[in-house]
Image: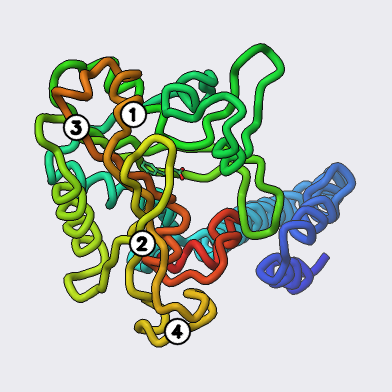
Amino acid sequence: MADQDWQAYLEAIDQADLTELEALRVEVLGRRGKLTEALRALSQLPPEARRESGQMLNRTKAAIEERLMSRRQTLAESALVQRLAEERVDLTLPGEPIALGHPHPLAMIQERLVSIFVAMGFQVALGPEVEDDWHNFEALNFPKDHPARDMQDSFTLASGGWLLRTHTSPVQIRAMRASAPGPLRIIAPGRVYRRDDDATHASAFHQIEGLVVDHGVSMAHLKATLATFVRELFGSKVAIRFRPSYFPFTEPSAELDVGCLFCGQKGCVLCSETGWLEVLGAGLVHPNVLLAGGYDPEAVTGFAFGLGIERLTMLYYQIPDVRILLQGDLQFLEQF
Ligand code: PHE
């Protein structure tokens, strides 16, 4: 084979990819390769010609081996460069933001309410969600078979006398029995249950109960406390009024309204055109309840109030429908 043919191989090697490179190596240097055969054929030549051809072929072989090696190296390097480019991480790019959660609006309002009362010197008290009839009704002056029990349709448990508490008021009894005859100032947030089955009432919801028992506690203390609370929450300009009401466990009883936050008291669907929104129930603790709590009604008096957290959250954020608070819809929740 002539020199320029070997030259053609060298040039082919410089253009080859990895597969072609291996094919070329086999073609030239393999067991039946062109160069291998040429070297084998040397033995047929006369001695002088053998020497010259032998030197030429060995140089060629060395040159081809060297080219193969350097081409292989070049290919490996460019594969590495490409891989580095593909896998490159730009540490100077801004990162993916990590989505942080936050408390649910109901939890935020509960927290806010509790902290307003804690600032006024109330202590947090908690009670069980599964209650007995005595704490939930009897001790709160609901006589057995009294129609007032119908105000709070309850879930009763199959095993005797237990029910899911219908309000946080049983915590009044538990707190009084833990503190009598000493003074008492508690706030009790928690979940309550009623067997309501219409579209606008959930069967589980949240309330906050407040109770103060001490010497000489009056309706004036109740009004001042609640007015302070409402103004802390809604601002000093909001209008408030007390309306007479009825609860078995308070006497006298009242309900507190705030001026409608949706229409500025002009009258709208949300306030039933009255200009007022009902916020909570309250009153002076009934003597029978003080007795059930272990106090002497001749010696001390008290006031109590209870409010629904869902309702207050709706007023606070001006949410017109309670159901959206319970659906876990992120488009809604992420607005808070
Ligand atoms: N427990 C009452 C209710 O659920 C609210 C209330 C609490 C009223 C304390 C007066 C005093 O409707």
Q: Is label 4 within 8 A of ligand 1 (CB to nearest ligand atom)?
A: no
What residue is at 14 percent from the left and 38 percent from the top? 217
- Check the image and name the residue furthest to the top: 160
Drawn side of residue 219 relative to residue 32, left or right: left
The quadrant where ligand 1 appears is top left
What's the distance in space between the residues labelled 2 and 3, CA to CA? 68 Å
What's the distance in space between the residues labelled 4 and 1, CA to CA? 36 Å
Mark 3 residue element:
strand
Which mark is first along the chain, 3 or 1?
A: 1
Asked whether the beta carbons under mark 2 and mark 1 sit within 8 Å of each other, the answer is no
What's the distance in space between the residues labelled 4 and 3, CA to CA? 38 Å
What's the distance in space between the residues labelled 2 and 1, CA to CA? 59 Å
- Mark toward the viewer: 1 or 3: 3
What's the distance in space between the residues labelled 1 and 3, CA to CA? 13 Å
Image quadrant holding the C terminus, namely bottom left
Amino acid under disc 3? Thr
Which mark is first along the chain, 4 or 2?
A: 2
The residue to which callout 1 is attached is: 172
Mark 4 residue element:
loop
Mark 1 residue element:
helix
- Mark toward the viewer: 2 or 1: 1
Percent position (x, y) of residue 153?
A: 63, 39
The residue to which callout 2 is attached is: 91
Pointer 2: residues within 10 angstroms few (<14), some, or many (20+)?
Answer: few
What's the distance in space between the residues labelled 2 and 4, CA to CA? 58 Å
Q: Which mark is residue 301?
A: 3
Q: Is label 1 within 8 A of ligand 1 (CB to nearest ligand atom)?
A: yes
Mark 2 residue element:
loop
Q: Residue 267 carries which label?
A: 4
